[in-house]
Amino acid sequence: MREVPFALLDEQSKKEIRRAILKGVAIPGYQVPFASREMPIGRGWGTGGLQLTLALIGKEDTLKVIDQGADDSVNAVNIKKLVQKTTGVQTTTHTQEASIVQSRHRIPEVPLTKEQILVLQVPEPEPLRAIERSEYKTKRYHAEKEYSGAYLMLFEQIMRYNQTSQGADYPVLVNGRYVMNPSPIPRFDNPKIHHNEALILFGAGREKKIYAVPPYTNVQSLAFEDYPFVVEQFAGKICRETGLSNVFLDELTDEETGETYYLCNDTSYMEEVLARKVAVKQ
């Protein structure tokens, strides 16, 4: 029986993905094509991020996987098991302990460091796809820095709702050159990309694209002078368990009382805060 290579992918595949990553780092926000491989999970379930992780991970790395803010979702657990089974690396739920964090839909609440890499899974990497279906034309728009369509999309939202209504996939301008889709993270997380100490990589397996934001890169969410960019507002709302108010909150309903309450979306961060509170009481 053929032995499974370390980190599942063969070395040539890893080299090709690393070359695409290097090009992405050299041209922040630029979508680099790559030969997306078949993975033992369906396309659209994180194959792009998984390939980046498998191409980068080493025996000394520690991996954390998040899905929608949770470490224990089916998607996160299965990806973590696959990487662990083919590499033997350690895994963790603590953001500070991870050297590689693979995530879908969230950037952790704990600030990342220069020693870490954040890998984001991306279903739709093209920020202009909603206004232009042609790949050829979107490539030309990027080449010409023609982003009026992206601004028009936000302008139409303001005309309709008196504010931008895009909750996720909110486009950003990277290093003053390329408009980039930051993956379906909430607007709340967009400012975390700006001048982040960690290398942030984006992988879209189905669309066969890789792009990157190197550490300390200037990243600005698109906005207008009279309608500046704002994140989701949680004024007057706090996490029921921790009392935190400066984090992204999930709105939930108590099944017994019907009462609406809020919880910190980053579950591992919430558990760490609760553990610290218990330790202080003891």
Image (cartoon, helix red, strand yellow):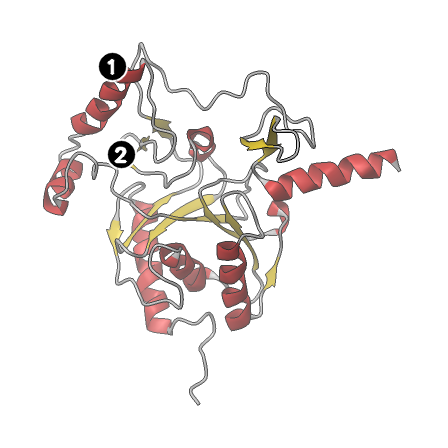
- The quarter holding residue 216 reads top left
- Against 246, is 130 above or below? below
Give whichever of 142, 167 is nearer the camera: 167
Number of numbered discs visible in the structure rendering: 2
Q: Position of residue 195 (x, y in %)?
A: 45, 33
The residue at which mark 2 appears reads as 179
Query: Residue visible at 62% across and 26% down?
Result: 259
Query: Residue visible at 50% across and 67% down?
Result: 82
Find numbered disc 2 in the image and state the secondary structure of the residue it sits on. Answer: strand
Q: Position of residue 127 (x, y in %)?
A: 26, 37
238 left or right, relative to 50? right
Q: Residues within 10 Å of mark 2 (few under 14, many from 20)?
A: many
Q: Amino acid at mark 2?
A: Val
C-alpha distance separating marks 1 and 2: 22 Å
Quarter placement of the N terminus: bottom left
- Against 116, is 163 above or below? above
Q: Please, which residue is most extreme toward the top here?
A: 226
Q: Amino acid at mark 1?
A: Met
Q: Please, which residue is most extreme toward the bottom here?
A: 1
279 left or right, relative to 188? right
Find numbered disc 1 in the image and state the secondary structure of the residue it sits on. Answer: helix
- Against 250, is 72 above or below? below
Q: Are marks 1 and 2 in contact (CB under 8 Å)?
A: no
Quarter placement of the C terminus: top right
Q: Residues within 10 Å of mark 1 (few under 14, many from 20)?
A: few
The residue at which mark 1 appears reads as 159
- The quarter holding residue 173 reads top left
